[in-house]
Amino acid sequence: MKKIFFVLLLSLAAKNLVAQKGWYIIENEQNKMKADFHYWGIQKNISMDVEFHNIKQLPYLPNIDSIITLVKQDLQYLSDSLKEDGIVRKLDYLVTPMLKKITITNHTEQPISYTVQNKELKQFKNAVDTLVIKLGVFNGDSISYVNNGKKEKLARCYPVYIKFYLNNLKDILELKNELVGICMNDIKSKIEKNKYAKRQSEDLNYGSSKLVNPAFEKDIVNYWNIKMKPKKSLEPVAGFGFQNINSIWLPSFSYGLRYGTKTDDGKITNTDWYLTLDNYYNYSGIGTSQQKREVYRYLTLKFVQTDPFDKKQNGFQFKPSLSLGYLISKSGDFFPGNSFKLSTHLIQSGWLSIGPELFFNDFFKSTSLGIKLSFNYE
């Protein structure tokens, strides 16, 4: 009866508001787990990991106490295979509404160590046993397919692994289920904190803490790692600068857009692309009746190789970048028509960057080399 009730729980976990036609676990190399939670020493000689394919699976997770109770009942039938010897074993327990599959792997290739106690030869292990409970759990998303010409929805389930590390697989029979429940509640709180950190641009994707509860024999050291999928972003940028070209200082102002990849903690990673309008100003005859301002506008495409840890460093750092601009309008003759510019930021510190600029004038008939000091707001 308990097993029938457990199967019903698993089936309910995969329900969605749309009609569902299937429930299955997908296991292949593409299923990279994106959220790991580690609890060391929840009970004597027992530690636990919980790994999610996606943290959105948590609300659909079936009752863990029922799962562990079911595992304990079934492992009693395997007591003869779980000998207390020096062989390291791994037990995989796959659960679906249609099937329970138990696989035991004996790592006999590992060396066996011995000790002599009271004139008796005894074996002891060089590593612990592992029990892996494999579940297929809905993540809230469904896929569409056509069935007899009718479009329907399918609940696609992905892996959730609950792992126990024990001196011997038999030790799971002594596990207090409520201790696992305390850890699951802690996971819920960690995920809520990570959502808050996402809104506040704080980094909680990897950390450690102590889980204090009188049910444990001692405080539990908890490590977690939540890997969020990077997001693409499009943001406005602006900046101003000064550049020395042919021994003349020209001020400049630029504005445009940046397209790049952002992690959920707000840090920029990988390569960012910029499309900006760079305006160079040349003033002549200042203080006279012949005072004049010339404006030269370059449409510029730039890419920057970024490091998510740059903001945590002090001083100047080398930041690979390259930009190419074309003169689209001008009101004077300082830059001739059909001019290009090539520039890079050799070093950067915060908003301040310094680098060379190379101008190719009138389709590469002449060149001018300058150096640019710029302040960029991003």
Image (cartoon, rainbow, N blue to C red):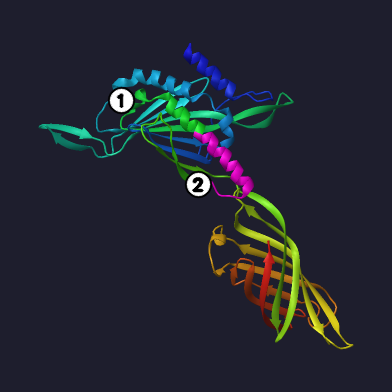
Does residue 108 appear left or right of residue 187 in this picture? left
Pick the residue in front: 260 or 367: 260
Q: Is residue 63 visible?
A: yes
Determine the image quadrant of residue 115: top left
Q: Which residue is mark 2?
A: 206
Rendered position, 22 above or below 5:
below
- Going by the numbered disc 1, the residue's amino acid type is Leu
Pick the residue in front: 58 or 366: 58
Q: Is residue 49 magenta?
A: no
Q: Which residue is mark 1?
A: 82
Pick the residue in front: 292 or 27: 292
Rendered position, 313 above or below 100:
below
Badge 2 crowding class, 10 Å Cα cut-off, few under 14, some 14 to 19, many 20 or more, is some
Residue occupying the point 54% across, 60% down = 312
Horizontal and vertical percent for residue 311? 57, 61
State the separation of the CA atoms marked 1 and 2. Answer: 35 Å
- Going by the numbered disc 2, the residue's amino acid type is Tyr
First-in-chain label (1 vs 2): 1
Q: Is residue 198 magenta?
A: yes
Start and end of the magenta stretch?
186-206
Label 2 element class: strand
Q: Which marked residue is nearer to the observer: mark 1 or mark 2?
A: 2
The single residue placed furthest to the right in the displayed view is 289
